[in-house]
Amino acid sequence: MGGPDSLHAVRPFLYNLFSDRDIIRLGPSFMQRPMAWLISSFRSGKTEQMYEQIGGKSPILDITTAQAEALEKELNSCSLQVPGSRLFKVYVGMRYWHPFIKNTVDKIIRDDIKDLMVLSLYPHYSKATTGSAIADFKKAITEFQISNFKFQIHYIDRWYDFSPYIDALSAIIAEGISEFKGESFDLLYSAHSLPKSFIDEGDPYLDHIKATIAAVNSSLVTRYSLLFNWHLSFQSKTGPVKWLEPSTEETIKTLAHSDCKNLFVVPISFVSDHIETLYEIDILYKKLAEEYGVNLKRCKAFNTDSKFILAIKDLIQNRLKGVK
């Protein structure tokens, strides 16, 4: 989605976010932008205070750029060993803040790229995330094709059950759990929430989340010999519509009343740090847990974790070979 690169960018970022009807529908279509303007104006002050507590901006662009550089290096380290093989250049495009997808597409065209792999950094597909981003990408391509520019485009729009991803996620979870030093704990998967109506209309997001959790749990038991109770909750809901439940906040309270002393939170639908991990979990939920006598630890985000970068490299190479 991108994120504001300064406190001054918070309000326009929120406006871009709430203007997207794929995220949330604000009345009839003609009211979407006026309502987005009102909401972004109303929420910007509080949101700026949140960003102030995590460094005054979102780290998402810096992290994603570092991921892109690491991935490009890995892809080309393999290619350079095979004479005549293709070389890779990795670009970053964001949905609601700079660098916008349209501007990235323009750069790709100017760089005379002929073959393009469009990779969503959301492992789990939803029309509100990957769907919206790819629609924006296709809109940009349509506009630029006025100049008869053409290239081969391939899409990777979901990879929630890709084995190297599951392995990398299991490894980083097991590493974090070791901090409890053998004490009992509960494992809480906290996913970004989604309006329930999306799921009712057939969006596969929740099924994808559950499939990832099932695969990771199996790996934690068989490969790492861990025994635990696990739970699924949802964070970051916005607006008055009904969202997926239970919320992470309510789940923490419920577990505290069930005598949970150690809680390990895995931000299951995220691959990098941003406001949902650094503020919501590390500050807001950790404080709540402390108030209820729960020792909350958060699984670190992938960011540029080497296993994660190698998993994405494998994902791309498999797709190029025609492996689903």
Image (spheres, grey):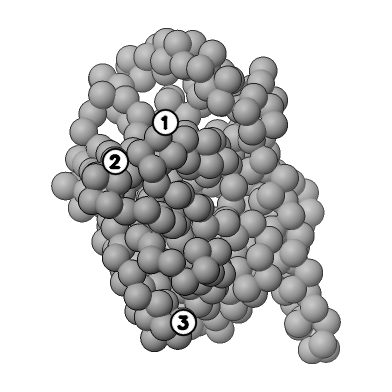
Q: Residue at x 46, y 49 (%)?
A: 296
For label 1, the SS is loop
Who comes first in sequence, dot 3 or dot 2? 3
Residue 305 found in image quarter: bottom right
Q: Which is nearer the eye, 321 or 125?
A: 125
Amino acid type, callout 3: Tyr
Q: Residues within 10 Å of mark 1 (few under 14, many from 20)?
A: some
Q: Which residue is mark 2?
A: 253
Along the horizontal axis of the image, is 124 left or right of 16? left
Please identify, in this view, whether the residue under mark 3 or under mark 1 is nearer the observer: 3
Amino acid type, callout 1: Asp
Q: Residues within 10 Å of mark 3 (few under 14, many from 20)?
A: few
Residue 97 found in image quarter: top right
Q: Residue at x 77, y 81 (%)?
A: 79
Residue 9 seen in the current view:
yes
Residue 37 found in image quarter: top left
The percent position of residue 93, horizontal first and vertical second, equals: 63, 46
Seen as rendered, the residue at the extreme left is 200
Which of the numbered marks, if any, corresponds to residue 224? 3
Q: Residues within 10 Å of mark 2 (few under 14, many from 20)?
A: some
For label 2, the SS is helix
Quote the CA–CA distance across marks 3 and 1.
Answer: 42 Å
Quote the CA–CA distance across marks 3 and 2.
Answer: 28 Å
Please identify, in this view, whether the residue under mark 3 or under mark 2 is nearer the observer: 2
Marks 3 and 1 in Cβ contact (< 8 Å): no
Amino acid type, callout 2: Lys
Which of the numbered marks, if any, corresponds to residue 20? 1
Residue 194 seen in the current view:
no
Who comes first in sequence, dot 3 or dot 1? 1
Quote the CA–CA distance across marks 1 and 2.
Answer: 33 Å
